[in-house]
Amino acid sequence: MDGAFDVHSHSGGAGIVVFSPAQVEALAGRVACRLVLDQGLGPVRLESDSLLLVQAMHSIQDSSIQLRVVYEDVLALFSQLPGSTFSHLYQEGNTAAHSLARWALCNRSCNVVFTSTPPFIEEIISRECT
């Protein structure tokens, strides 16, 4: 990871290289908790198809040393969401979130915030609810 700062424009950027799916899932957990806190939402039910991440929320001591720092961040953020739950579900039950993550990967967009549900997500949710 690295950061760059332009003193003339007073702006900066950061770059992160992620080497494993477990790292991406852990970072997604941190982003989710941060988003919920920043938006003042809660209590919420967070669900992940990453069993490693969900297990780490119950026992960080047993988690990978390489991911422990991120897991600790997720747990610290999650602890600020009283009444919220963090649970595991299989990938088949996580289709909407997975599709949104794939969309972000393909579009390489940064900091996109939807003010309404994107049509491709509405279709998935509609199929899952019928």
Image: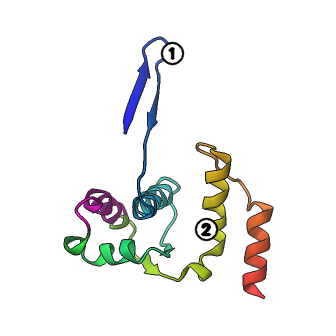
Looking at the picture, tell me which residue is in the foreground, 59 or 62.
Answer: 62
Badge 1: residue crowd in 10 Å (few <14, some 14–19, many ≥20):
few
Left or right, 45 with reference to 125:
left
Give the image location of residue 70, x and y in percent: 32, 57
Q: Quadrant of the N terminus?
A: top left
For the stretch drawn in magenta, what is the main secondary structure? Answer: helix
Q: Is the residue 39 above or below the residue 61 in the image?
A: above
Q: Amino acid at mark 1?
A: Ser
| Residue that mark 2 sits on | 98
| Residue that mark 1 sits on | 9
Measuring 29% from the left and 78% from the top, which residue is drawn there? 58
Give the image location of residue 118, x and y in percent: 76, 60
Give the image location of residue 100, x and y in percent: 65, 61
Do callouts 1 and 2 mark residues in contact (Cβ within 8 Å)?
Answer: no
Quadrant of residue 59 within the rendered picture? bottom left
Is disc 1 placed on a helix, strand or loop? loop
Measuring 78% from the left and 64% from the top, which residue is drawn there? 120
Q: Amino acid at mark 2?
A: His
Marks 1 and 2, how far apart in space? 36 Å
Front: mark 1 or 2: 2
Q: Is the residue 27 above or below the residue 92 in the image?
A: above
Badge 2: residue crowd in 10 Å (few <14, some 14–19, many ≥20):
some
Q: Is residue 65 magenta?
A: yes
Q: Which residues are magenta?
A: 64-77
Q: Quadrant of the C terminus?
A: bottom right
Looking at the picture, tell me which residue is in the foreground, 44 or 86.
Answer: 86
Q: Is the residue 95 above or below the residue 33 in the image?
A: below
Q: Is residue 73 magenta?
A: yes
Is disc 2 placed on a helix, strand or loop? helix
Chain-order first, disc 1 or disc 2: 1
Task: Pick out the residue farthest to the left.
Answer: 61
Quadrant of residue 102 within the rendered picture? bottom right
